[in-house]
Amino acid sequence: FFSSLFVIAREPYKGGTPALLDRFEPFSTGGTATFPGHMFFLASIDEPDHILYRFTVKEFPENIYRYDPYLVHGDEQATQQNLKQLDEDQLQLYLNMDRTRKFNQIYKNFTGRSYLV
């Protein structure tokens, strides 16, 4: 997972071609101007036809999306096993991103706004 560049693209409109919007390094963040209902997907630059994550933008405050290839929802043991693939530097990057995600929840509960980095 960690050796790939990822691309985010807008879903094709009425059977058209996807539009490349940005490239992301692993453990990075980014954003785009958009609106509710806009559809996107994330794919590896090495396999652009293999879609890793697909989402449709929702209304605020549910408008921040995260792709985590290591997280296994409901199975902490499997998540920890996946994290063993990372070296120490990569693990620290992952843990920093996870702390930011958790802080966003606290911040949103307190202020009603999303915390963006």
Image: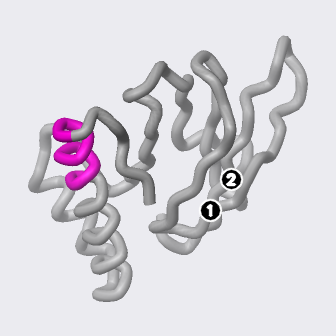
Give amino acid for label 1. Phe
Q: Main secondary structure of the magenta part?
A: helix
According to the picture, the residue beneath numbered tag 2 turns out to be 7
| Mark 2 neighbour class, 10 Å CA radius: few under 14, some 14 to 19, many 20 or more | some
Image point (13%, 45%), residue name:
75
Q: Position of residue 9 (x, y in %)?
A: 72, 41
Image point (62%, 62%), residue name:
24
In this view, the residue farthest toward the top is: 14
Cα distance between the residues tagged 2 and 1: 6 Å
Give amino acid for label 2. Val
Whether residue 86 appears in magenta in the rendering, the answer is no
Q: Position of residue 10 (x, y in %)?
A: 73, 33
Provide the secondary structure element on which disc 1 rests. Answer: strand
Instruction: Say if 101 sits above or below 36 in the image.
Output: below
Residue 11 placement: quadrant:
top right
Provide the secondary structure element on which disc 2 rests. Answer: strand
Residue 112 placement: quadrant:
top left
Query: Considering depth in this image, is 92 or 47 the residue closer to the camera?
Result: 92
Whether residue 108 appears in magenta in the rendering, the answer is yes
According to the picture, the residue beneath numbered tag 1 turns out to be 24
| Mark 1 neighbour class, 10 Å CA radius: few under 14, some 14 to 19, many 20 or more | some
Position of the C terminus, as image quadrant, is bottom left
